[in-house]
Each structure stands twice: as C-alpha cells, then as structure tokens.
Amino acid sequence: MDASSTTNIPLVDLASQHAEVESDVLSGLEDVFATTAFIGGTAVGQFEGAYAEWLGVAHCVGVANGTEALELALRATGVDAGSEVIIPVNTFIATAEAVVRIGAIPVFVDVDPAHLLIDPAKVAEAVTDRTRAIVPVHLFGQAAPVEQLQDIAASCGATIIEDAAQAQGATRNGRPAGGLGAVAGTSFYPGKNLGAAGDAGAVTTNDPEIAKRVRLLGAHGSATKYVHDVVGFNSRLDTIQAVVLNAKLRRLSAWNGLRQEAAARYAEMLGDVPGISVPTSAEGNEDVWHLYVIRTAARDRALAGLSEAGIGAGIHYPTPLHLTGAFAQLGLAEGAFPVAERAAREILSLPLYPHITIAQQKFVVETLRALV
Ligand SMILES: *Cc1c(COP(=O)(O)O)cnc(C)c1O
C-alpha cells in the first residue's frame, strides 16, 4: 500500500516510521545478537542517558512498560496499600491499574471542559487525610497544570507523580512533561510519540534517591547480584526494544514537529466545518499532539462514516473509568463526573502521525464535513 494514498488512512502509521529507522534498527540488533547481551547491555544504558538528556531530566530508568513505570513510581515514593491516589477519570485504564496493583485506592476526579486535563479545583475537593499521591495525566500530548497542584499536594503531604505516556517532548512554561512532579512514568507502547517494537516504558525524575529506588524495585529488589534487601519484581527495559528506541529517539524532535504542523493544518481546515470544535493547547503548553481529538455532537455517525471511507478514527476513551466494569465496585454512578461523561459522548480522534500528508488530511476533513 502507498503510505500517502487516501484510500486507507490509518489512525497511526507505524510503517512509515519504521521505514525511516529500519537500517539503524537492524544494525543495532546485529550487535545485540553478536554479543548475546540480551539483558541490559549497552543499548539500555545508552537509551536511558539519551532520553534523560533529550527530555531535560536528571534520571531515566528503563522499565518493561508504562503501567509498571507508574507502579514503580508510586512504590518508590512510598505510596502503599490503603493510600488514596487522586487521578483523572478520563484516562487510559493503566493509570488506575498501577494504583490498584499496590493495594492503594484510586480516587477519581473530573477534568476541565476546555482541555480535558485534571481539574485542580476538583483535586482540592478530593483530598482526605489518606491522600498520598496525585497523578496528573498529560493527555493527548499536552501537559496537565501541575504547578496548580503543588500547593494542594504540599498541604496534604502528597507526592505528584506524572503520567507522561502521551506527552514525550511536551513542555509547560518551558519545563518538560515528565520533569514537572517528583517522578513520572511513561510508556513506549508502539503507538506513542516514541514507540518501541513491543512493550517498553521508563520512569523519569530529577531525584537521585527515587531513581535508585525505582531501579532497585524493578530489578528484584537487588542492587548487587543475589543481595535482596526489599521485595521487588522484574520490570526491565528489553535490550531489543532499547535498540529500536535509540533509533527513533534521534528522530523524535523532528517527528513531534511534523505532528505540530499537521495539527495546525487540521485546525485551519476544520475551522469552517460547522458542528465541530477543534482541540486547543492550554496557555504555557507546547503540545506534541499524541492524539488530535475533536468534539462533535454527531460523533457516532462521524465515526461510522469515517470507518466506511477507510479512515481510522478512534475514541480515547469511550468510557470514563468509574463507569467501567473494572471499577464498578467503587459505586460511582453516571452523573458523578459530568465533564468527562459528556466528553466521552463527543470526542473523536482523527488520524494524526508525523508522516500524514496534506492530501490525506484534506480527505479526512472533506469526509467529515459531509457527515456532521
Ligand atoms: C499508554 C498509556 C499507559 C500505559 O502504557 P503501557 O505501556 O501500555 O503499559 C499509561 N497511561 C496512559 C495515559 C497511556 O496512554
């Protein structure tokens, strides 16, 4: 298939990305197999250093996936069983899973209607004497208002742990998403702005003690082979994934720039389409457009029509977490989080990736115009 055709436009185009890095990846893999350094090895350390530097944080610890990155970040900052952790209700379920995995209690809060990011006023209302952490999610490619959570966190002794899985390279007031709180978890799931060829993730922090603790917990509680001071588990960044990530990291700034250009084009092209509102970036934010999420009352019709036309649109996410079966036991009914619930009925993610062409975007917009 011609990647620039308009007959089949994917939501995310991983093939074009891979074509750019293929020769780097293959030569890196040859080294791994030649040395049989399958665990750790130079690629992992190289990636950790390069990612920390690219992001602008002091430490990066590679781990197995984004969910475990968040779990390790929570554990490394002392969040334990019975602790309450405040999270936005409209996130990928992994944010909440990480909390539940350590026996802590997810406390959902609603989001701001303009950007669907965690609402600091709602966080303040949700604080109790058991609150140990607040997890702002940098959703769709832009940073949550972390600085507005600092006073709330300080007043109750909570730690700010960022979910940076959708915002690799985003900044807020010139500071990097993933370096705004005490510690952050990120994911290199293939479809993320920086994606591996399988599962991978990382924890980033400016605090050397937290970095050390994450590394310990993710390596069987052991800093020295067969000396186990705490019970940890196995969550390592796979060497083969580190090879892929090294190759893609070198192109990530350029790819994020192409996403920004594509987002600006959508905003212009969609400006005169009635019945649609286009996403905007909050003040102070440099947005890296992980997803391009419009809103329309005709969402279901638009999604069906786009699919029929061969356009891969999606919904991120169709069900706010309190209404999923997984969290039914919290007893939170429809109406608990009106902003997120309304958004879930109206949001629609359009195809957006670094290699999307103007012709593809025009086709998406013209197809959409006829549907809404
Ligand atoms: C992708 C994602 C994760 C988890 O990532 P995995 O690597 O799939 O475990 C966590 N939070 C958010 C917001 C995500 O988008």
Image (cartoon, grey):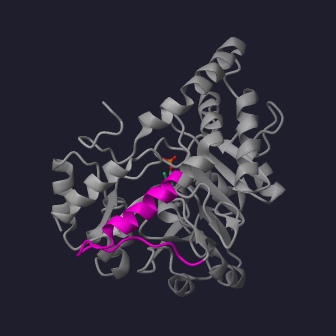
Per the rendered image, the range of residues in magenta is: 258-283
Residue 82 in which image quadrant: bottom right
List x then y, in percent, for residue 122.
50, 84
State the residue at coordinates (30%, 30%): 1
State the residue at coordinates (22%, 61%): 368
Of all residues, the one furthest to the top in this rendering is 34
- Height in image: 107 above or below 232? below
Residue 202 is covered by the magenta coloring: no
Q: Decide if residue 301 is on the left or right side of residue 14.
A: left
List x then y, in percent, for residue 162.
61, 64
Q: How many marks?
A: 0
- Height in image: 328 above or below 147? above
| Nearer the observer, 281 or 314 | 281
State the residue at coordinates (67%, 42%): 62
For the C terminus, the image quarter is: bottom left
Q: Decide if residue 194 is on the left or right side of residue 349.
A: right
List x then y, in percent, for residue 76.
71, 56
| Nearer the observer, 164 or 307 | 307
Q: Decide if residue 35 is on the left or right side of residue 99.
A: right
Residue 131 in which image quadrant: bottom right
| Nearer the observer, 85 or 136 | 136
List x then y, in percent, for residue 279.
41, 70
Residue 175 visible to the viewer = yes
State the residue at coordinates (67%, 19%): 32
Residue 273 is covered by the magenta coloring: yes
Residue 327 visible to the viewer = no
